Amino acid sequence: MYRRTVDGTVLDFGTTGALRQSNLLMYDRQTETWWQEVGGEGVIGHFAGRKLEQLYLSIVSWADFKAAHPDGQVLSRPDSGRAYGQNPYAGYDRPGSEPFLFRGEKDPRLPAVERVAAVERGNEAWAVSFTTLAEERVVAASVAGQDIVVFWSPGTASALDSGSIARGRDVGTAGIFSSRGPDGNMLTFAPDAEGHIVDQQTGSQWDIFGRAIHGPLEGEQLTPVPGRIGQLWFSWAVYRPDTVVYQGAG
């Protein structure tokens, strides 16, 4: 997700119908610049070489969203006739699958269709696989001097597994946040015996949105860190082959 204002101009975007390394190319209607979806960089046209400002985005289950934001707004066009709950690419992300329409070189460090949580800071890029996150639940890192923590939670269906998204296998979701608490001090996080994420300094419990929901810090919010959450590895690695991959606590 990106901010659509560039040099004070609000841009309207559409899809070009073209792919680059199996990744969407967008265009803006004001200048007809073509923009790469991964990285948000203008690749052809007036804004070539410019990057859109990345904003925080995570894909969560509808149940989690409703629970956290009961008054949240939903972008919907009920009369569009589109079957939003259906997936025309069933099986796309099943283990062992090959990426559709991708002809680039695959990075063997992770399976091509493995989901990752990835962060770019300065000249550095870092990623952790959802498989590792599902095992550890919490992963801490430092990327270009910024201390971050990645939370993982089950309960989110894959949008690419089944013809019906609601029947997709549970791939979970992640959240990326600054490791510093509301007072600016460093917090260290770990799953408790029930799998809840707690900080070791206060024993507060945190949800996938980076909110303290129980304990001394209840009501506080960690600072979200923009990144790519749920990106398929092949699509990320072809643009950031220099990515450092977290290999697990072991």
Image: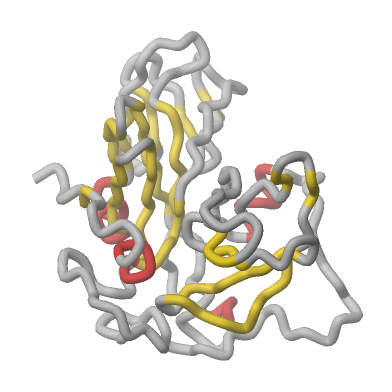
Would residue 105 be found to the left or right of residue 73 on screen? Answer: left
Would residue 100 be found to the left or right of residue 109 on screen? Answer: right
Res. 116 image quadrant? bottom left
Position of residue 15 relative to residue 123, above or below, is below
Position of residue 83 relative to residue 182, above or below, is below
Residue positioned 40% across, 15% down in the render = 202
Residue positioned 37% across, 36% down in the render = 122
Residue 220 percent location from the top left of the image: 58, 21
Q: Of all residues shown, which one is farthest toward the front?
A: 46
Q: Of all residues shown, which one is farthest toward the left?
A: 250
Would residue 125 be found to the left or right of residue 85 on screen? Answer: left
Residue 145 percent location from the top left of the image: 30, 25
Q: How is the image coloured?
A: secondary structure
For the C terminus, give its image quadrant.
Answer: top left
Residue 164 percent location from the top left of the image: 59, 85
Position of residue 40 relative to residue 76, above or below, is above
Front-lying residue, 37 or 195: 37
Residue positioned 30% across, 41% down in the render = 124
Front-lying residue, 102 or 228: 102
Count of marks placed on residues: 0
Residue positioned 52% across, 35% down in the render = 224
Residue 77 percent location from the top left of the image: 86, 72
Position of residue 80 relative to residue 56, above or below, is below
Front-lying residue, 84 or 215: 84
